[in-house]
């Protein structure tokens, strides 16, 4: 046991951290490729959309396949809406972007409620706060990238990366039934 956790739990924590890190890294790669019109957009999108499936594989042994697939669907919708929002912003379609943004935040509400419904250690308000912050920063990251303000874009991504690890830690603590306020 290290830090009060078993080796198996530490491995599980590492997997969760890796999945949340991959979530934000592949989102970033999608934003960069979209902004620059790079030819790697299709394989990057495919890899990004694998992330919800990977989460489902991790959660299935704990919650069962049905619940894991529900999370997969919600997270997939999160990514698709985010991609649509980046494209609408790139194309200067502000009304379309506003509509997508509303759906994106509604999806965040659904994810927060879902997580709280399957684990009493996961607080809906905390997940909603984290997800809203994630959406705000991701949209800011995309906007700065589209504007060519790369230094600011990188600074925002540093915050996104830190927040992803905080989400991973909260998820892990809930999974090992250790509620941390």
Image: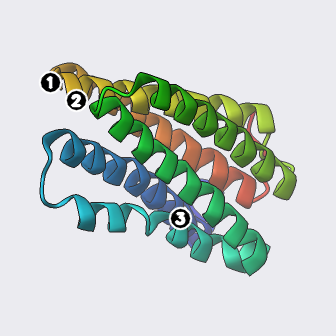
**Gap in angstroms between the C-alphas marked 2 and 1:** 5 Å
> Which quadrant of the structure image shows residue 12?
bottom right
In the picture provided, is 73 more to the left or to the right than 179?
Answer: left
- In the image, what residue occupies the spot 37% across and 24% down? 140
Residue 153 in percent (x, y) is at 25, 26
- In the image, what residue occupies the spot 23% across and 45% down? 34
Disc 3 marks which residue?
Answer: 52
- The reply to whether the C-beta atoms of the residues labelled 3 and 1 are less than 8 Å apart is no
Instruction: Decide if residue 140 is in sight here.
Output: yes
Q: In terms of sequence position, does the residue under pointer 3 or pointer 1 come before the other?
A: 3
Residue 135 in percent (x, y) is at 51, 33
Which is more toward the observer, 13 or 20?
20
> Which quadrant of the structure image shows residue 69?
bottom right
Instruction: Decide if residue 178 is in sight here.
Output: no
- The reply to whether the C-beta atoms of the residues labelled 2 and 3 are less than 8 Å apart is no
**Gap in angstroms between the C-alphas marked 3 and 1:** 29 Å
Disc 1 marks which residue?
Answer: 148
Q: Residues within 10 Å of mark 2 (few under 14, many from 20)?
A: many
């Amino acid at each position: 046991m290290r830090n009060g956790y078993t080796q198996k739990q530490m491995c599980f924590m590492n997997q969760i951290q890796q999945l949340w890190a991959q979530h934000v890294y592949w989102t970033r790669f999608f934003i960069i490729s979209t902004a620059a019109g790079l030819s790697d957009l299709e394989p990057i999108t495919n890899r990004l959309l694998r992330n919800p499936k990977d989460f489902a594989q991790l959660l299935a042994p704990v919650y069962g396949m049905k619940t894991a697939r529900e999370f997969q669907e919600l997270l997939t919708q999160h990514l698709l809406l985010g991609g649509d929002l980046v494209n609408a912003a790139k194309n200067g379609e502000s009304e379309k972007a506003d509509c997508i943004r509303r759906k994106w935040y509604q999806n965040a509400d659904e994810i927060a409620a879902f997580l709280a419904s399957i684990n009493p250690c996961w607080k809906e308000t905390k997940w909603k706060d984290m997800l809203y912050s994630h959406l705000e920063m991701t949209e800011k990251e995309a906007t700065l990238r589209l504007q060519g303000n790369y230094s600011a874009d990188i600074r925002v991504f540093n915050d996104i990366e830190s927040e992803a690890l905080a989400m991973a830690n909260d998820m892990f603590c809930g999974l090992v039934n250790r509620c941390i306020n």
